[in-house]
Image (cartoon, rainbow, N blue to C red):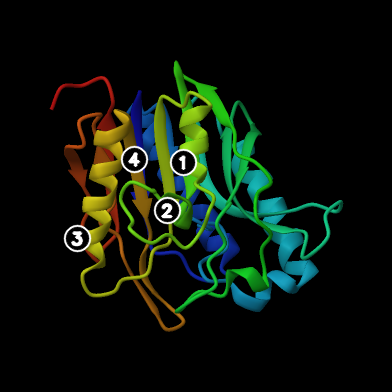
Amino acid sequence: MKLALFQIDTVIGDIKGNKEKIITGYRKAVKDKADLVVFPELALLGYPSLDLVEKKEFRDTVNIAAHEIAAQTNAVGLLFGSLTEEDDVVGTNLFNSALLCYEGKIQFVQHKTLIPNYDVFDEMRYFESARDVFVHEFKGEKLGISICEDIWNDKDYWKKRLYSNDPVERLLDKKATFLINISASPYSYGKRKARLEMLSALTEKDKIGLAYVCNVGAQTDLIFDGASMCFDIAGNLIQLGKNFDEDYILYDTDKKY
């Protein structure tokens, strides 16, 4: 499977601009014969969107834009982060979600499971946790899709974990054959090295490939460094995105590097 990863600089609340960036990137990747095009966490509305998500008009605009993006797709998949809403749960009813689109529709949605509420994060104020995780069969792969924090809880890597639940472990239990993590991971000193070591250890241990795509730019008081990465089943780093700059990465999972 040939993946196209876009680490982009989104703007909080600029749904029209972010939507156009996603569609433009998708069309470029289609011309490059990609099978699946991947954008970061909450790419459609910007991260962190904070109290904007509490406004119904904003949520409705996001929902309309998500379906407009999906309508532009053909057989090539498009995965991007967005906000979704449900009416039958107690709490905010809002989810930080990954939307997989192809053939003109949103075909699969995976909500974020681990909702951080420490340091610079205050996602619990806005989002509910996914009730379960699922794999999705696409182009001969069983995709295990996770969102940012979901991949930071491996019991064999971390001596002390923040959560009892490991969404990636559950995806592997459900026979995922390739992992994708869409992220908006803020920069801090030493984090890039820790991130690389953690993802390398995970892919080597579980003998599974991984594509990790992170956004770039500065929003509110956060800085995002990009450095998107692709790993093979031996834990080798195959592709590395630019630091603090937008980038476009192609990774063929069937190619020997």
- Label 2 sits on what residue type? Asn
- Disc nearer the start of the sequence (2/1): 2
Report, in whole angstroms, how far the alpha carbon at label 3 lies from the one at label 1.
20 Å
Q: Which residue is mark 2?
A: 153
Report, in whole angstroms, how far the alpha carbon at label 2 lies from the one at label 1.
8 Å
Q: Which residue is mark 1?
A: 168
Report, in whole angstroms, how far the alpha carbon at label 4 lies from the one at label 2.
17 Å
Q: Which is nearer the eye, 194 or 229?
A: 194
Residue farthest along the top direction in this orientation = 140
Q: Which residue is mark 3?
A: 193
Q: Nearer the viewer, mark 4 or mark 2?
A: 2
Does the residue at mark 3 contact the one at mark 1 (Cβ under 8 Å)? no
Task: Tell me if residue 12 comes above or below residue 18 in the rendering.
Answer: below
Tell me residue 45's x, y (percent): 57, 63
Q: Residues within 10 Å of mark 2 (few under 14, many from 20)?
A: many
Does the residue at mark 3 contact the one at mark 2 (Cβ under 8 Å)? no
Does the residue at mark 2 contact the one at mark 1 (Cβ under 8 Å)? yes
Residue farthest along the left direction in this orientation = 257
Q: Nearer the viewer, mark 3 or mark 1?
A: 1
Tell me residue 99's x, y (percent): 59, 43
Task: Tell me if residue 194 comes above or below residue 171 in the rendering.
Answer: below
The local secondary structure at tag 3 comes to helix
- Say which quarter of the image contains residue 50: bottom right
- Label 4 sits on what residue type? Ala
- Label 1 sits on what residue type? Val
Q: Nearer the viewer, mark 1 or mark 4?
A: 1
- Disc nearer the start of the sequence (3/2): 2
